[in-house]
Amino acid sequence: MTDSELLRVAARFDTDGKITSVELYGSGHINYTYKATGTGKDYTLQKINTSLFTNPDTLMHNICLVTEYLRDTVAREAPDERVLRVVPTLDGKPYLTDESGTYRMYEFIDESVCYDAVKSVDDFNSCAFAFGRFATYLDGFDAKQLYEIIPNFHNTVDRMRKFKTALASDALGRAKDVEKEIKFFLDRESYCSKITSLLDSGEMPTRVTHNDTKLNNILFSEKTGKPLAIIDLDTVMPGSVCYDFGDSIRFGCNTAAEDEPDTDKVGFSTELFEAYVKGYLKGFDKITPIERKNLLWGAILMTYECGMRFLTDYLEGDTYFHTQRKGQNLDRARTQIRMVELMEKDFDKLQNIVDNA
Ligand code: ADP
Ligand code: GN1
Ligand code: MG
């Protein structure tokens, strides 16, 4: 996208003042995010990834409904915090489609900072509290109002099916070089149904969850260092709190980056795990015994599933997750494999932490 194209797109939204600059921003793997600045407020402009979000109407329906619902609750319960605010187009729509793509705009959350790695145990504990409270806030929200934006998003059984399809077609002939990684996922196929079977039988409640709770989907206040806003609401839809807990652990407890090429650098921080468990349970006191019992499994499964998704994308030619270099999805898959191994090794110790928190 050229600057002038982006400025032309930005001008079609109902902004305060004139947008004079649009710069690429953030480190998300899915959408293209820009910071738009000018004579008035700052904004976040996003080019929506429509190969994945094929129906912008239902996507924005969910986001508008959830943000409006959260706004009242957050204003009452945590007035210092912020909720994403969708900026409509000049003709009053929540997104814009032109010949170059589909776009939406949010108010930019000022004086915020976003981290790709945990800075301190306390920060991670307050991040956990914020995600726990997010689950509490949405406890009264009727899931029937929401569309399932990406069907089977955290259905690990279905993810395994897709992995096997990618493996069978092996479009780029890459499978022969990653036999060890392929075997890792196939050997653990029995993991896949651990949570889906509890949801299907009704033993575990299906709730409205975020489904993408990694650290860079929460903004912290530059002033207070506390969580300021939960963002990236594209995948808010029915799910399990074990997934939300688990995805934060997958990303945050890794002592290395998600795409670290040297897996010897990958470590699982038990200290961060404990801090997250405590913060999450404090924020989400409505958790049921079966959900609590399966939190650790949520962490193992989210890591296993995400690793399998990275490897699937590697086999399919890196078409889903944004990549900046060759082999990046394979590196990502390998860090996830290492994290699963480390959680398996310390399973009893980690389960005790959850049970005793
Ligand atoms: P993706 O789906 O590609 O991950 P996100 O919605 O997470 O996209 O946005 C990418 C990044 O942009 C975030 O990690 C954050 O740094 C920044 N960001 C997104 N929305 C806002 C906002 N309203 N205010 C400030 N920063 C934002
Ligand atoms: C993607 O959009 P982003 O970068 O916050 C992905 C998540 C993965 C994550 C791995 C819609 O999240 O499911 O866990 O990458 N989002 C989607 O880092 O697929
Ligand atoms: Mg994101």
Image: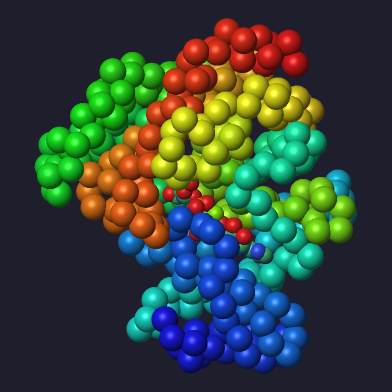
Q: Is residue 197 visible?
A: no
- Figure check: 283 above or below 115: above
Say which of 234 and 144 sits in front. 234
Left or right: residue 191 compared with residue 176: right
Quadrant of ligand 3: it is bottom right
Residue at the spot 32% in from the left edge and 49% down from the top edge: 327
Position of the C terminus by quadrant: top right
Left or right: residue 66 compared with residue 9: right
Rendering quarter of residue 129: top right
Rendering quarter of residue 320: bottom left
- Figure check: 336 above or below 59: above
Position of the N terminus by quadrant: bottom left
Say which of 147 and 15 sits in front. 15
Q: How many marks?
A: 0
Residue at the spot 44% in from the left edge and 33% down from the top edge: 263
Tell me residue 297's x, y (percent): 51, 20
Tell me residue 15's x, y (percent): 67, 84
Q: Is residue 157 visible?
A: yes
